[in-house]
Image (cartoon, rainbow, N blue to C red):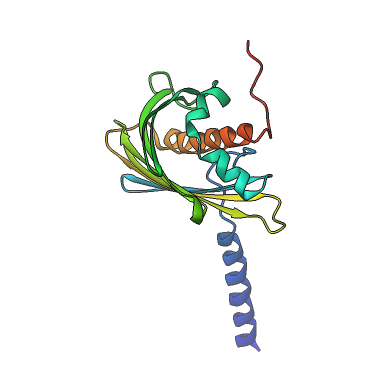
Amino acid sequence: MRTILVTLVAVTLALALGGCRGKAEPSCPPAKEIATSRVVKNGDTWDVALTSNIPAPIDKVLEAAMHPERGHDLVPESILKSELVGQDGNSKTLDIVARLDILPPGFKVQNVKTEYTYYPQEKRFTTKSIDFKLADITAQYQFEPSADGKGTLLKFTEKSKDKAPMIVESLQKGALCETFAIQVRVVRRALGLEQPPAAS
C-alpha cells in the first residue's frame, strides 16, 4: 500500500511540474501584432520565434509583405526611411532607418541595410542584414493559411548575432519584439486592417 501511495505521489508531482514547464511564459510583452513569442539568448546569439495572426487571405498578406519599401509611407512614426537601393530577380535590398521606442537615447534610431529574398511559391521570404554595426541578422517569414482559410498565420524565425558590446539583455529582447511588431504593422496597414495615426 505504501509503495502505491509513493508511486501516486511521484506521478502526481511529475504531472504537476510537467504542466508548469509546458506553459512557457511569452518572451514579448502583449501586442496585437504578436500571437506567440520565444526569444532566448545562447552565448552571443539571439534565437527568435514569433507568430502573428493576420485576418486576411494568405495571398493578399504575402503580396502586402513583399513591399517593405512602403514601410515609411505606412508606419512613418517608426520607420523613418525605407529606400529601395537594389533589386535583382527575386531579391531586394533596402536601406532602412527605424526608431525603436523601447531603446534608450543614443540607441533609439537604428540604420540597417537589409536584403530580402522572396520565394512566393513556398509562401515565404528571407532577410539578412548587409550593413549593420550591432549584429548579423538572418530571418525567415513563413506564411500559412488559417484553418478556415480566411486568415493567415505568419511564423517568424530569426538569429541575431551580436557584433559589439550591447545594451542590457532585457532591452535587446524588447527591441527584437518591437521590430517584428512594426513589420507586422506595415503589412496590416497595407491591407487596410488599421490606419496610420493622424498627422500631428
Q: Which residue is found at the position 51% from the left and 38% from the top?
A: 180
Is residue 101 in view?
A: no
Q: Which residue is found at the position 64% from the left and 23% from the top?
A: 196
Residue positioned most to the front: 89
Would you place residue 120 above or below residue 178 in this image?
below
Instruction: Tell me where residue 2 sits by quadrant.
Output: bottom right
Residue positioned most to the top: 200
Q: From the viewer's side, name the closer residue of 10 and 180.
A: 180
Is residue 155 in view?
A: yes
Q: From the viewer's side, name the closer residue of 108 and 139.
A: 139
Q: Which residue is found at the position 34% from the left and 38% from the top?
A: 129
Instruction: Residue 12: give x, y in percent of width and height.
Output: 63, 73
Instruction: Residue 183: give x, y in percent of width and height.
Output: 52, 35
Q: What is the number of callouts on the image?
A: 0
Would you place residue 25 above or below residue 115 in this image?
below
Which quadrant would the N terminus be assigned to in this image?
A: bottom right
Which quadrant would the C terminus be assigned to in this image?
A: top right
Residue positioned most to the left: 164
Is 84 placed left or right of 27 in the picture?
A: left
Instruction: Residue 143: give x, y in percent of width and height.
Output: 55, 51
Is 116 placed left or right of 183 in the picture?
A: left
Instruction: Residue 103: give x, y in percent of width and height.
Output: 45, 26
Q: From the viewer's side, name the closer residue of 61 and 45.
A: 61
Q: Which residue is found at the position 56% from the left and 32% from the top?
A: 186
